[in-house]
Image (spheres, rainbow, N blue to C red):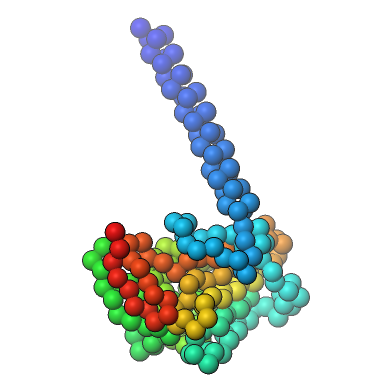
Amino acid sequence: MKKTFYSFIYIILIVSIFGYYFYIEIKEYLENQKVYNSYKMSNIPDYNGTSYIYINNNEPEFNLEDKEKCPFEEYYDLDDLGRCTGAYACLSKELMPTEERSNISHIKPSGWKISRYDFIEGEYLFNRCHLIAYSLSGENDNVNNLITCTRYLNAISMLEFEEKVANYIRRTDNHVLYRVKPIFDKTNLIAKGVQMEAYSIEDNGEGIKYNVFLYNIEPRVHIDYLDGSNYLVN
């Protein structure tokens, strides 16, 4: 009886080990498929259920000579329609804030509207979205750094990539080249998404390296990017 019990435990252990490695293989395969299905900024496909896509095979396109200026922050001027045009930085631990973020409700980025849906966390469809997160830069109510974005883009999609960078900097004290650019179609006041690039300097991108486009969407809500009007969809 005891022998049978130990044999059963052994089989469970073996199955678990093989199951874990099978999961890792599948995960790596899916990640590689995402990189393989990469695009150029000139031919971004319409949103099809994937929150982000890879650009340029996930390779950022920095001028690495800029690392000589580290640390730095640059927030580009608004365009003629009052839209953000981008932000660029070499991030480091010394730029990170040491106090809580203050209120920014007085900022009204292009296309700003107040819309509520009870299935969204916090109910508000739109957030004031920092191009370079406050947690990375300490930059808060800079109008050149804030766009109208969905709760989904702000608190889920962008947060994933921002936390990778923040955790890396805290762990290593290294520097990261970092650029975020909102992408607007024609005269639309709401960005259809943002391009995010990052590259860790001291280890030549081994710790952090990505080039992605994240869609400014909210599941179940149709958004008119021209002016921010929206309605519920099934």
Q: Is residue 127 in view?
A: no
| Residue 191 pos. (x, y %) | 48, 76
Question: What is the count of numbered marks?
Answer: 0
Hey, which residue is sitting farthest right in the picture?
A: 65
Q: Nearer the viewer, residue 188 or 11?
A: 188
Viewed as shown, does residue 181 lie left or right of 151?
A: right
Using the image, determine if residue 2 lies above or below residue 9: above
- The residue lying toward the viewer, choosing from 158 and 149, is 149
Please identify the residue farthest to the left as the structure is shown. Answer: 118
Q: Quadrant of residue 202?
A: bottom right
Q: Quadrant of residue 100?
A: bottom left
Q: Position of residue 11 (x, y in %)?
A: 46, 19
The residue that appears at 32% across and 62% down in the rendered structure is 220
**Quarter holding residue 70:** bottom right
> Which residue is found at the position 30% from the left and 63% from the top?
233
Residue 217, position as x, y percentages in the image: 41, 67
Q: Residue furthest top?
A: 1
Left or right: where 159 falls relative to 126 = right
Q: Is residue 180 above or below residue 37?
A: below
**What residue is rendered at 54% in x and 39% in y?**
26
**Residue placed farthest to the bottom in the image?**
80
Which part of the image, by quadrant, shows the C terminus?
A: bottom left
| Residue 204 vertical placement versus 138 (above, below) | above
Q: Is residue 20 visible?
A: yes
Image coords of residue 135 (percent x, y): 47, 73
Q: Which quarter of the figure is the N terminus placed in?
A: top left
Identify which residue, 90 or 87, lies in the foreground.
Answer: 87
